[in-house]
Image (tube, rainbow, N blue to C red):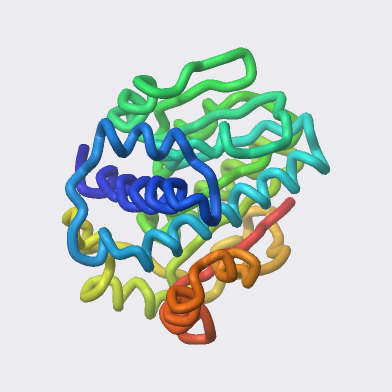
Amino acid sequence: MNEVNRTLFIPLYGKALVSRQNIILKDTMAERIWEAEAFPVHGKSGSKWLAYNMAMRARVFDDWTDEMLKSDPDACVLHIGCGLDSRCLRVSQPYRCWIDCDFPDVIAVRKKYYEEKDNYSMMAADASRPEQIKTLPESDSAVVVLEGLCMYLKKGQLHDLLRVLKEKYRELHILMDVYTEFGAKASKYKNPINDVGVTTVYGIDDIEEVINGTGLRFVREHSFTPAALVNELKPLDRELFRLLFTGPFYRKIYRLFELAS
């Protein structure tokens, strides 16, 4: 795997760690894959604080996906940049169609652990290449998960991805996390992805600038660290975590946006 693809091991480690502790989310598949594939993590990548943060982010995406499926059970779920994530197993709502997409070498590893079914499949696709996104399955509506992906796309590439998705699906719901421009600059000096060799990421300050002309609208901003999940931590960890990953300063680095058609 190249440097960007290796970043998938950082959230995988975090989810496996909290799953073993029975907090935030239960992810037995992450535990299993981490046991078999464990990529060496060190420095910030192995921090328990980051593990908590990655797991909370995953849980927020899980809960949102369940919410979308509850309101539109016929929607096709597209997890673009899925890595080795097991959201397709963690959500509680049934789904008609789920497609997990990533680079070919990532999908090759996924296929060692996940079995394709009538309502679930895996597909090699590069989010920066609109012609590949156009080959995604047809559906009247789609729920799109862009977790840990947008910071690797330039603004123009992200705009094109969103535009092509809107052209393909009449009704669209998207949840996406992004770095701010300040966060992208700061990540060159202090970011766990540096530990696997990634030094270039991109940030967004004005979401309206990115979605202009795509046919999408901004719905709301979500929190990465809902109080109910933070409260699952032990008292001392809870207070330290709040200092590190909540509050206005963290929002200056990292944002979570919901979009819709």
Quarter-of-image position of residue 102 = top left
Q: Residue at x 34, y 49 (%)?
A: 13
Residue 232 rendering spot, x and y as whole percentages: 56, 64
Query: Which residue is depicted at the point 45% across and 78% down?
Result: 236
Q: Which sits in the foreground, 37 or 21?
A: 21
The residue most toward the right is 71
Query: Looking at the rendering, which quadrant does residue 89 occupy?
Result: top right
Query: Going 72% across and 63% down the picture, which residue do you hit?
Result: 219
- Quick check: 119 left or right of 247? right
Residue found at x 30% / y 77%: 186
Left or right: 3 with respect to 95? left
At which x and y percent is residue 188?
A: 23, 72
Instruction: Pick the residue in front: 232 or 49.
Output: 232
Tell me, yes or no, if residue 203 can be seen here. Answer: yes
Residue 24 percent across, percent down from the top left: 54, 56
Is 16 left, or right, of 176 in this rendering? left
In this rendering, would 140 be left or right of 28? Answer: right
Name the image quarter holding the N terminus: top left
Viewer-closest of 241 and 142:
241
Decide if residue 149 is in sight here: no
Front residue of 122 and 94: 94
Instruction: Classify 111 as above or below 89.
Output: above
Residue 217 sits above or below residue 235 on the image: above
